[in-house]
Every structure is written in structure tokens, then in C-alpha cells.
Image (spheres, rainbow, N blue to C red):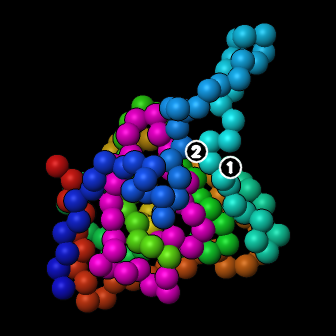
């Protein structure tokens, strides 16, 4: 079976079953530090507490992807959410499938995440690893703790291609 997926513009509505957008748009900031800074509170819901997990903050150095690209696997994190926030002004792509024992290829989606926006995958949502448009750093917030928080699925008979531009 051969499948070609083209990413669509991400919105809070079309991404809702997979996670949340992280953005300061539509959020009123709080003035802090005698007016020298603005604080945007509660941008997403980090979930790491299953099996006494703790949140960790990491930096991933992502390499630029080339398109079309072969999607040969997906992964999920059943014990916690995982947030990706670009540390440069750029867009990136996400490739997702709903929760389940394995990725449902009929429900696979890909989205273009715009500049100044991050994403937070819900726990147990299938996704392809980071798809960056350039060599750059991402701030990542996820879970550390006991238990297996990484499950991977390798596609065997499916030939899935992500086509961008």
C-alpha cells in the first residue's frame, strides 16, 4: 500500500485530538519585573505524573529534513505529554495518528506549525520524530521516570511518503 501525505495548516481545532498549540496569541500577558517583562501563563498542560514521573527540559538539535521523506515508523509516549518549542523563527512539521495499539494509517495527518508556535503532544498519541525545516534547536519538555515511556511501531507493508512543497 502506497500513501502520500501532504501537510495542512495547523489550528487549535484540527490538532485538538493530538495535543495543543503553544503560542502567546490570544493570551493576555501579565506585566512583571516592574514592566520590563511580560509573562504568558499556562500555555499548555504538561502531563508527566503517571508512575511518579517528573518533567524534564531538554534541547534537541534537529537536522533539516529533505522532502519527500519516507515515513517508516511512528512512536508514542504512553506515560506523558511531549512539548516541542522551536528556539528560532521557523516553521516545522508534525506527523501524527490518534491513540491506539498501532497507528491507524487511515487517520494519519500532517500539519505545518507556523513561526512563533510550538506543540504539545498528548500522552499516547502516535507521532513521527521531530521534522525540522532547518538545522536548529528545539526546547523539549517531557517525562523522566520509571516505566516504558517510548513505544515504536515500524511500518512493514505500507509505503508512506510525506510530501512538502
In the image, is residue 162 above or below residue 75?
above
The residue that appears at 45% across and 84% down in the rendered structure is 102
- Residues at discs 2 and 1 in contact (Cβ within 8 Å): yes
Disc assigned to residue 120: none
Q: Which residue is mark 2?
A: 139
In the image, is residue 124 above or below residue 132?
below
> What number of labels is visible?
2
Which residue range is magenta in the image?
A: 100-126
Of the pair 9 and 85, the residue shown nearer to us: 9
Quarter location, residue 5: bottom left
Q: Which residue is mark 1?
A: 57
Of the pair 65 and 20, the residue shown nearer to us: 20
The residue that appears at 34% across and 74% down in the rendered structure is 107
How far across and down, in percent of the image, does residue 90 sit? 38, 36
In the image, is residue 160 above or below residue 102?
above
How far across and down, in percent of the image, does residue 101 sit? 50, 87
Amino acid at each position: 500500500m502506497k500513501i502520500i501525505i501532504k501537510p495542512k495548516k495547523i489550528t487549535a481545532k484540527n490538532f485538538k485530538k493530538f495535543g495543543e498549540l503553544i503560542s502567546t496569541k490570544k493570551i493576555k500577558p501579565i506585566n512583571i519585573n516592574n514592566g520590563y517583562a511580560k509573562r504568558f501563563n499556562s500555555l499548555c498542560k504538561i502531563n508527566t505524573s503517571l508512575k511518579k514521573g517528573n518533567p524534564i527540559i531538554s534541547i534537541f538539535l534537529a537536522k533539516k529534513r529533505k522532502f519527500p521523506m519516507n515515513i517508516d515508523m511512528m512512536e508514542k509516549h504512553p506515560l506523558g505529554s511531549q512539548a516541542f518549542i522551536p528556539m528560532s523563527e521557523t516553521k516545522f512539521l508534525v506527523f501524527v495518528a490518534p491513540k491506539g495499539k498501532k497507528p491507524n494509517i487511515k487517520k494519519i495527518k500532517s500539519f505545518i506549525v507556523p513561526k512563533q508556535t510550538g506543540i504539545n503532544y498528548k500522552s499516547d498519541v502516535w507521532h513521527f520524530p521531530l521534522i525540522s525545516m532547518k538545522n536548529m534547536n528545539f526546547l523539549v519538555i517531557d517525562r523522566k521516570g520509571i516505566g516504558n515511556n517510548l513505544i515504536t511501531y515500524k511500518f512493514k507493508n505500507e509505503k508512506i511518503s510525506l510530501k512538502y512543497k
